Amino acid sequence: MQKKPSEELGDFNKLFNEYKERFTRFANTYVRDISVAEDFTNDSFLYYWENRATIDTQSNPPAYILTTLKHKCLNYLQSVQIRQDVSEKLRLHAEWELQTRITSLEACEPYQLFTEEIQNIVNESLRNLPEKTRKIFLLSRKENYSHKEIAEKVGLSTKSVEFHINKTLKVLRENLKDYLPVLTYLSLFL
């Protein structure tokens, strides 16, 4: 025999009042958030109410509602676990990326990065100088001869030697203008 809607509602209210608090405590044991537990409990009762016509009349309503509640809690906890796993992977990736940047920066030697390039520019600049100017500059800088010694060696006045050295320095300054700030900075630490 079919129950009247008011009887069904009365039975449901009785079921709700009898089990709501117990089911909420059950859910809260797992989700550890009372508002989430209450929402899941209410949703489970609502799901039962909305689907009561399709549920076997021999079924146990509290067991049906508790099973629904169990699945809601499981889905929630699995979702929390996925978020935590993703957060952990993101944290590990960020930590790895930071460590990579630190290691890379520690290994970076600005002096070495520029030395070869600067040396190539200096060599090319010296190759393009007139032979006499290049020879005077190399005697001054590589052989550490004084201006007077160079003048005697090449048969020029000391003023002419200074002219050739200044000419070479001007060419080098021009060709190395992009590196001068770096060279100045490095010279402070070398």
Image (cartoon, helix red, strand yellow):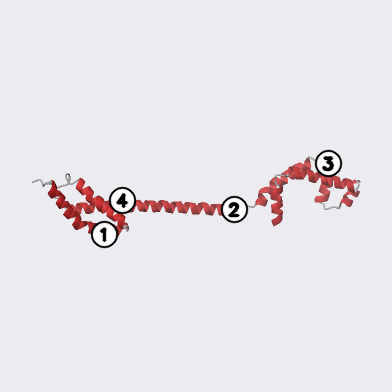
Distance (Cα) linking label 4 and label 2: 45 Å
The numbered mark at residue 105 is 2
Q: Are marks 4 and 1 in contact (CB under 8 Å)?
A: no
Q: Amino acid at mark 3?
A: Glu
At mark 1, the secondary structure is helix
Badge 2 or badge 1: first in the primary sequence: 1
Locate the C terminus by quadrant.
Answer: bottom right
At mark 4, the secondary structure is helix
Q: Nearer the viewer, mark 4 or mark 2?
A: 4
Name the residue carrying label 3: 131
At mark 2, the secondary structure is helix
Name the residue carrying label 1: 25
Left or right, 27 with reference to 146: left
Name the residue carrying label 4: 75
Badge 4 or badge 2: first in the primary sequence: 4
Distance (Cα) linking label 2 and label 1: 54 Å
The image shows residue 69 at horizontal and vertical percentages of: 25, 53
The image shows residue 98 at horizontal and vertical percentages of: 52, 53
Left or right, 27 with reference to 188: left
The front one of 94 and 39 is: 39
Task: Determine crowd level at label 1: few under 14, some 14-19, many 20+ residues with C-alpha closer than 10 A.
Answer: some
Q: Nearer the viewer, mark 4 or mark 1?
A: 1
